[in-house]
Image: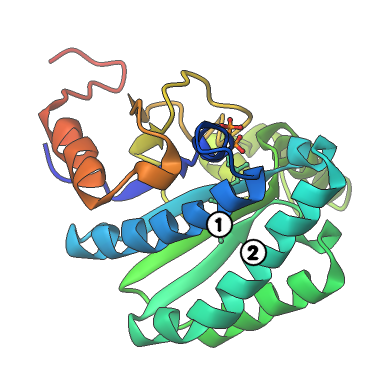
């Protein structure tokens, strides 16, 4: 099979990586940023057009305040330091999730980076921030009801492709491959509808230790799989 067009990653295990080294959880996330950069490079090398990273779920607000604030400032730093890298590599930045609920400075930095990279297409890098698949579906249903009431949408004609235009992922193809690191086997409220036919690959490696060869191994394994989409071979 061909290489996946859209790879989405649940970057898990930063906390456990740090704990094993007697470091703070934030030190684990900081190390995780290095992996983010490596994986972006690997995606480009493997000619993958869409990469989506689950950086902050809507449930992550429940973590200690120190960790939440730390994650927000890591994200700020990433956008500040790496914007030039995104531009040089013609990477378009997108987000999914309720980013309007993020701290104002972070929100503005994201919007600025999205604007400055809007025309690029070597890689579309989507970061899931304050993302929850269930919330995304609720938001879509609200918009659908509104459009139906205003007669700009015919409910009789509503099907999945139409519904998908109301999701945050409306400009992205559905993911072909979902990678989760750290040996967990869950989707954790990530792209639940969109991954209906995604292949799932789990790696036992903690995210900070995940490298380009682990990524390439996942891609190679994907190419060996047979996808039937409910049909027979
Ligand atoms: C899961 O590990 C990881 C997160 C909740 C945060 C991931 C964020 C980053 C890698 C940095 C920000 C990303 C970008 C794109 C700038 P965990 O803390 O749940 O690990 P654990 O299960 O071992 O505790």
Q: Which mark is residue 30?
A: 1
Q: Residue at x 75, y 48 (%)?
A: 67
Tell me: 130 left or right of 206.
right
Q: Nearer the viewer, mark 2 or mark 1?
A: 1
Give how far across and how far down residue 19 sits, in percent: 57, 34
**Residue 17 vertical placement versus 233 (above, below):** below
> Which quarter of the rendered picture does the C terminus lie within?
top left
Tell me what residue is drawn at x 60 percent, y 60 percent: 95
Q: CA distance from mark 2 to mark 1?
A: 7 Å
Element class at badge 2 = helix
The quarter of the displayed image where residue 71 is located: bottom right
Q: Quick one: label 2, few (<14), some, or many (20+) residues within 10 Å?
A: some
Q: Is mark 2 within 8 Å of ligand 1?
A: yes
Q: Which is nearer the eye, 123 or 137?
A: 123
Residue 65, image x and y in percent? 86, 47
Q: Which residue is mark 2?
A: 74
Quarter location, residue 114: bottom right
Q: Is mark 1 within 8 Å of ligand 1?
A: yes
Q: Are marks 2 and 1 in contact (CB under 8 Å)?
A: yes
């Amino acid at each position: 099979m061909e290489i996946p067009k859209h790879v989405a990653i649940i970057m898990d295990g930063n906390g456990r990586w740090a704990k094993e080294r007697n470091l703070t959880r934030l030190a684990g996330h900081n190390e995780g940023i290095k992996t983010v950069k490596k994986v972006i490079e690997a995606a480009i090398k493997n000619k993958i057009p869409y990469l989506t990273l689950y950086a902050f779920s809507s449930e992550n607000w429940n973590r200690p305040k120190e960790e939440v604030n730390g994650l927000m400032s890591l994200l700020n730093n990433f956008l500040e330091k790496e914007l030039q890298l995104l531009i040089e590599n013609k990477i378009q930045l997108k987000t999914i999730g309720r980013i309007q609920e993020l701290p104002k400075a972070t929100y503005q930095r994201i919007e600025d980076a999205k604007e400055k990279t809007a025309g690029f297409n070597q890689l579309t890098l989507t970061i899931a921030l304050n993302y929850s698949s269930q919330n995304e579906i609720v938001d879509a249903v609200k918009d659908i009801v509104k459009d139906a009431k205003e007669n700009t949408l015919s409910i009789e004609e509503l099907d999945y492709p139409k519904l998908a235009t109301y999701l945050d992922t409306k400009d992205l193809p559905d993911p072909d491959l979902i990678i989760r690191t750290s040996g967990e086997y869950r989707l954790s409220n990530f792209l639940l509808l969109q991954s209906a036919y995604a292949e799932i690959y789990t790696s036992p490696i903690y995210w900070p230790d995940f490298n380009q060869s682990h990524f390439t191994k996942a891609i190679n394994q994907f190419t060996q799989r047979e996808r039937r989409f409910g049909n027979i071979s």
